[in-house]
Image (cartoon, coloured by chain):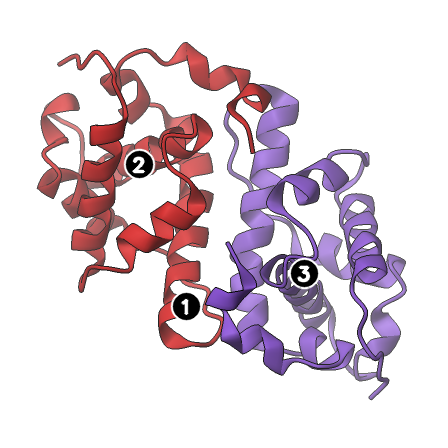
Chain colours: A red, B purple
Amino acid sequence: MDVKDFPFVSKRENLTDILVDHELAALGDAYVNFAYSLMLSRKMGRPVGRKVDSSALALALRKAGLRRFLPSRTDRHRQADAAESLVVYAWLTSAISLEETVQIIEKEETVEDAFAQLLQAIMERLSLPHQKV
Amino acid sequence: MDVKDFPFVSKRENLTDILVDHELAALGDAYVNFAYSLMLSRKMGRPVGRKVDSSALALALRKAGLRRFLPSRTDRHRQADAAESLVVYAWLTSAISLEETVQIIEKEETVEDAFAQLLQAIMERLSLPHQKV
C-alpha cells in the first residue's frame, strides 16, 4: 500500500497534529487490532482476533515519552487514540510495514511494553518537527 | 507477510473446513474491518475507521454462491463469520494481498456487492477441493 493512495496523510506536519487527530485514530484502531491479532496468531500457532485494551495503549504512550506532546487535560481514552493515530500514520507514510509492526510487538512480554517499543521505533524513523501544545 | 509465518493455515484442506472455522473468523474480522476502513479512507480522502456489518457479509456470502458449502442450519451471524474466514485465509496463504483486497472492494457501490466480488475473486484464485457437508 503506497502513501500516494492516501493524499490526506501529507497534511499532518507536526507530531501533535497527528496525535490529536481523531479520524486518524479511528483508522489506527483497525490497524492496531489487526496487527495485534496477527502477532497473537503467530505466537499461539492458531488464528486469534483480539482488540488491544485502551488502557494498555495509553500506558504505552506514556512509557514511550509521548504524553508531553498532548494537551495537559487529555484523558486516557484520548491517550490511547493518540497511540493509534501515530502507529497508523507511520504505516500510511511507509515509515513502518505491517510485518515490522508485528515483529516489534511480538518481542515484549506485556501489551503496554509491546506498544511502547513500537511507538519508540516509529519516533526514531519519523522526522517530524515536534511541537508542544 | 508470508504464509510460512502461519503454519496453522496449511491444516485447512477443503472449503467447508475454512468457512466453519470460528478462530479464523475472529482474525478475519480484524482483517476485513481494516481493509474496509482503508477502502473508505481512500474513497473519502480522509481517515475512516468502520466495521463491516454482519448482515452485509452474510448477504455477500450468499451472493457469491458460497452458502451451499455451509451446514444448512447456519445462521446469518455464522454466514458472516464464514465470509471473514475465507477472506483472511486467502490473505494468509498469499492468494490475495491487502492492496488487491482494497482495490476489489472499492469498485462496488454496496458493501454486500463489494464483498461478494471479493469472495468470488478469492474462489477463482484458490484451488481447493470443494466439499459439501
Mark 2 or 3: in front is: 3
Q: Pointer 3 indicates a residue of which chain?
A: B
Which three-letter amino acid code belongs to the residue tagged 1?
A: Arg
Mark pair 3, 1: CA separation:
16 Å
Which residue is disc 1 drawn over? A42
Q: Which residue is mark 2?
A: A81
User: What chain does mark 2 sit on?
Assistant: A
Depth check: A2 or A15 in front? A2
Q: Which residue is mark 3?
A: B90
Amino acid type at image mark 2: Asp
Left or right placement of residue B97 versus residue B131 in this view: left
Give the label on residue A86, or none: none
User: What residue do we see at 53% from left, 77% from top?
Assistant: B8
Image location of residue B48, percent across then percent down: 52, 31
A73 or B41, which lies in front?
A: B41
Query: Circle 3: is it few (<14), some (14-19), or many (20+) Cα within 10 Å?
Result: many
In the image, residue B61 sits, relative to residue A80, either above or below, namely below
Find numbered disc 3 in the image and state the secondary structure of the residue it sits on. Answer: helix
Spatial separation of the CA atoms under disc 2 and disc 3: 30 Å
Residue at (83, 48) in percent of width and height: B117
In terms of image quadrants, where is residue B19?
Answer: bottom right
Mark 3 in CB contact with mark 1 (< 8 angstroms) = no
